[in-house]
Every structure is written in structure tokens, then in C-alpha cells.
Amino acid sequence: MSPSHPALPPAPSSPSRRLSRPAIGLAVGLAALALAGCQSRGGLGDITGSIGKTTAQPRSPADWHAESERWGKRYDANPKDRDAAFYYARALRALDQNAQTLAVLQNAVLTHSNDREMLGAYGRSLADNGRLREADEVLSRAHSPERPDWRILSAQGTVADQLGEHARAQQIYQAALKIAPNEPTVLSNLGLSLALSRQLPEAERVLREAAAAGGGDPRVRQNLVLVLGLQGRFTEAETLAKQVQSPAEAAATIAYLKRSVSQQNSWDMLKTGGPKGKPKPHASAPVAAAPQG
């Protein structure tokens, strides 16, 4: 619900939006779309795949703090150093320091205006800070027809979903799949987008395809749990939830889904992550994304 839409546009098993989140908000990412889209925030992508160089990434908060210190010193010494700006921003984003990430990238794109990786990271950061229209415009400039990038397309799709433009988002995901067929992060974001469009049987089909292609990524299964629950298939949903959550967390997730789908405004609640003023169950696994952006 990545870019998972989620993703933007992650990557990809590092610390993502990984700390406890409401099971619905987590699985739905639907407002933030995330799986697949995305994936680790450190990749400056979304569950939706990473927008950034494919270097090995830290795996713990302590590692990300060390990475931030290391690149931060180099960035302070020379803010125009391309790699210092890029990797410092990557570490800041992994630590959820969204405002500071955006400040670094805003400065970097002034110097590196033709750097598509930098533009992709900047677009995702704009989305993280709620500046969705700007993110959409920047991401559209981060790739070109002659040099398309499925990661950036997936990220752009998660932004379109967050803007409520689900048909356009689905077209973007399909374009990404032409470049990277069966890419699980894109499939997961597409599945979440279809769920937001209330196309639940098709959303289920796509998410099962993503699960088969994703090597057991728990975020894809979480998204599938959501779609099964929305169809009232709670026994199936709980069985699947127990594969990625503790029994208590799985039971809480299903109980919340049952309450949600029984209410008239359940779709509005799902888009916003749950009812106002009521406690929501939490799940330990990260999600995507979104969409995997």
C-alpha cells in the first residue's frame, strides 16, 4: 500500500516503518500504502521498492545512527558532496527524521538537479512530509520514457493512491510491472490500490501473486490478511495472520477487522487507519509502503 502502496517510494529488510503500528494501518498502508511499496525506508524508496543505490544497508537502529553520524560529518564538511547528502538523507529517513531528511535533499537537488536517484529520494521525502502534489511532480521527473525506473514508478503510484487517484495509480503500477514483471513490491502496492478501489477479488488475486513471488515477505501476507478480512473471510484471515504475528496479535487484528467491516463507514476508517478515539491492535511486523513507494 511500494510504492509494499503503501512504498515511496523501500527496500527494501532494514528498519522501515517498522515499529509497532495499528494492524489495519499497517496492513492497509492504504493511506500510506506501504508494503511493498515499501520496504525499507532506508532505501529512500517506499514499500514500494527502493530509490537509491543498491549498497548494503544497516539493519538495526544503532547501525543507522552510526551511519547518520558518519555521513553527517562528511556532509557538514561539504554539503555539495553528492554521496554524503544522499547517504546522510538515507540514514535520517531510516530514523524517521523526515523534516531533516527533506532539508538535506532540498539542498542536494539544487546542486545535483539532473541526478535521477537524488530526485527520486527527494520525491519520496516530500511524500513522507505530506507534500503529495509536489512529490508527484518530482517523481514524474525522476525517470523518463527512454530510461524508466520501476522503483520510481512504484513510488509514484503510492503517491497517486494517497491522493485518492486509484485508477491512475494502477496504471502506474502496470507500467512498473512491464519493466519488472512479477516484482512483489509492485504487485503488493497494486493489490492495496485495488482494495482501495473496492475491487476485492482482484486485489486478493494480485496479493496472492505477490506472496508467491515475494519469498514469504510478511508484509505481503499482512496485506492479504486485510483483503480477506474485508471480504468477511475471517477464519482464513486469522490462519494467515498467525504466520506473521503472535496468536494474541493475530486475534486482535481479526477482532478489529470484524468491528471495522460491520460499520457503515468502514471504508473511510480503513483509509484513515481506524476509528477515531478507539484503541487499535498493534502488529510487530513492518509494512509496507506502499504501496512499497
Image (cartoon, rainbow, N blue to C red):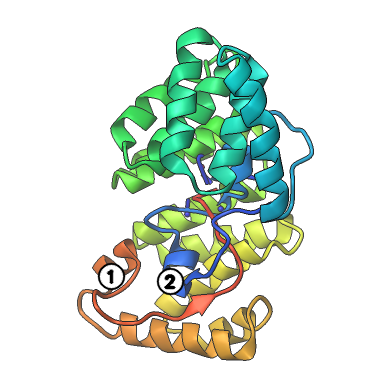
Marks 1 and 2, how far apart at CA: 9 Å
Percent position of residue 198, x then y = 35, 63
Q: Quadrant of residue 205?
A: bottom right
What x and y, as percent, mark residue 155?
A: 50, 38
Q: Is residue 39 left or right of residue 229?
A: right
Q: Residue at x 52, y 15 (%)?
A: 144
Residue 219 showing in the rendered view: yes
Residue sitting nearer the eye, 174 or 185: 185
Whether tag 1 and tag 2 are in contact, CB under 8 A, the answer is yes
Q: Residue at x 71, y 61 (%)?
A: 212
Q: Is residue 262 left or right of residue 43?
A: left
Mark number for residue 24?
Answer: 2
Seen from the viewer's position, the closer of residues 13 and 34 is: 13
Q: Is residue 237 above or below residue 11?
A: below
Which numbered disc, 1 or 2, marks the residue that appears first in the sequence?
Answer: 2
Check the image and name the residue furthest to the right.
Answer: 56
The percent position of residue 16, horizontal first and vertical second, equals 59, 53
Instruction: Say which element carries label 1.
Output: helix
Amino acid type at circle 2 is Ile
- Picture layout, residue 44 above or below residue 119: below
Q: Residue at x 53, y 29 (%)?
A: 121
Amino acid type at mark 1: Met
Q: What residue occupies the far left of the structure in this picture?
A: 264
Please rate how many residues cluster around mark 2, counting C-alpha atoms within 10 Å: few if below 14, some from 14 to 19, many from 20: many
Q: Exactly how many numbered labels are in the figure?
A: 2
Looking at the picture, how far across and down is residue 18, in whole percent? 58, 61
Which residue is depicted at the point 24% across and 82% down? 263
Closer to the camera, 55 or 206? Answer: 55
Q: Which mark is residue 91?
A: none
Q: Is residue 121 left or right of residue 263?
A: right
Rendered view: 32 above or below 268? above
Mark carried by residue 269: 1
